[in-house]
Amino acid sequence: MYDLRYLRDNLDSLREQLAARGADVAWDDLRKVLTERKGLAAHVEQLRHDLKKGSEEVARLKRVGQSADATMAEMKALGDRIREAEEGLRGVEERLEQLALRIPNLPHASVPAGRDASENVEVRRWGAPPAMTWFPRPHWELGERLGILDFERAAKIAGARFAVLTGLGAKLERALINYMLDCHVDRHGYREMVPPFLVNRASMTGTGQLPKFEEDLFHLRDDPYLLIPTAEVPVTNFHREEILDEQTLPRRYAAYTPCFRREAGSYGKDTRGLIRQHQFNKVELVSFVKAEQSYEELERLTGHAEAILRGLGLPYRVMALCAEDMGFAAAKTYDLEVWLPSQGVFREISSCSNFEAFQARRANIRVRVGQGKKDGKTEFVHTLNGSGLAVGRTLVAVLENYQDADGNVAIPTALRPYMGGLDRISA
RNA sequence: GGAGAGGUGACGGAGUGGCCGAACGUGCCGGUCUCGAAAACCGGUGUCCGGGCAACUGGACCGUGGGUUCAAAUCCCACCCUCUCCGCCA
């Protein structure tokens, strides 16, 4: 979401800079509506001014005991005109908002150009894929053999794209959540949070899910709540409509939540296994920082997500997403991709983004700077978030990378304290 | 789900139709005083949109949205939220 003044003054250059990213934005309508709004607003304000003066005149006349009937009649007529003008203005503003809310964020200068995932740029790589002399089993095979993953019964209970973790599988999931949270909270200094998993439309609009991505979300039939697709939504909106103290920044939060995604439009993709589910667990990191610190913070936050993969000994690479592969709200994104032996590929396990002021403008999250002076001004904060990590996919990576020739799975050392000292899951 | 109370600026708290963007107090900022500080005293202190180089100026905002009225923080309606009690649950 852009500032309307900025939008009016920079429409052409913005359109140019967004290029293909803003291809589906109704630029010409936008220009028309912007000028229309400005004229209407000025008109309404003038009328309201006249009404105010007239009403004051009525009060004055009555005070001195004169008849105010003429002025009152005049003002009554003016009131009707105002109502009419206001209605028109309201309509224009609504249209403007619907248009403006669909403009994606501008990629940062350091973002590589490119059309799709094939043009993402590898930034660095860590760890070596484990040497396996046997044919690596996919995680669903390992999981079902070990009795810790049940897709069939999940389909019975709910449907496709759901899973049941049982026994040591459930425990391993819980161990991963706790390991991640402890790491971020105790070592990296994040404040732990358990937010609502259902949110209202204003929150979804604040972080950018609405209005454009309505069909990706689960809705409730009888209540105005939506299921969160990521903890980014409730945690970022924690400070919606707030003016933060400069000294309290950066604010860093870590939250574990389940995430719910309809995965509409992904039919046929990743249909087996845990990779793409309607419900999955994630530990999310969210930062609120001053504008000048946000790129430093992006590196830092990405590093914190990487620390989990290193701690677990999982090989991964860091990808800088190209302009058109980034999400709607992001100015810059790094994806962390973990090595999956069964597929012989790296798969996304974390996405770390700087949204700059894009979400802050939508959600109206500001900071007061130059405090103490009476010229203390407010400016928008920059928001960032990243998965630290997607828990289900981490479990997949552990199963696959730590399997042995018999299909048993070793527990990474760092997780053993969370597994009651267990060092291996065997059939 | 039922009954009641209430939502005003950073906070406490006035305000039941006009001169109220809002008394007063606290906090905060600046100043006087002081070796320094505290106290005391004086002054200042909301956000957003528009016009202006600026001083300044027009408009909006007292939970949200409608309505009544020449005029609404104040009256009416709906909704949301908070608190208390009952019911139900974890």
Image: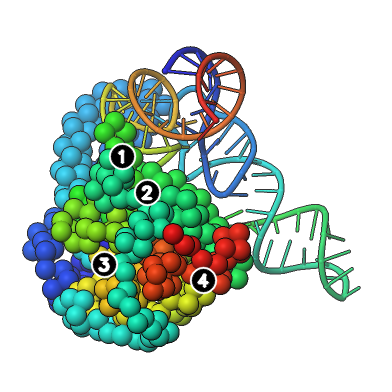
Query: Residue at label 2?
Result: A164
Q: In the picture provided, is A261 more to the left or to the right than A268?
A: right
Q: Quadrant of the C terminus of chain A?
A: bottom left
Quadrant of residue A114 within the rendered picture: bottom left
Using the numbered discs, state the Cα–Cα distance from disc 4 to disc 3 in whole angstroms. 33 Å
The residue labelled by disc 1 is: A157
Mark 2 or 4, nearer chain start: 2
For the residue pair A427 and A333, the one nearer the viewer reads as A427
Residue A306, image quadrant:
bottom left
Which subunit holds the residue at mark 3? A
Q: Secondary structure at mark 3?
A: loop
Q: Nearer the viewer, residue A409 or A82?
A: A409
Question: Residue at position x 26%, y 33% from top?
Answer: A221
| Image position of A186 with respect to A332: above or below | above
Q: Are marks 2 and 1 in contact (CB under 8 Å)?
A: yes
Residue at the image point whose x is 24% and y is 81% from the top: A120
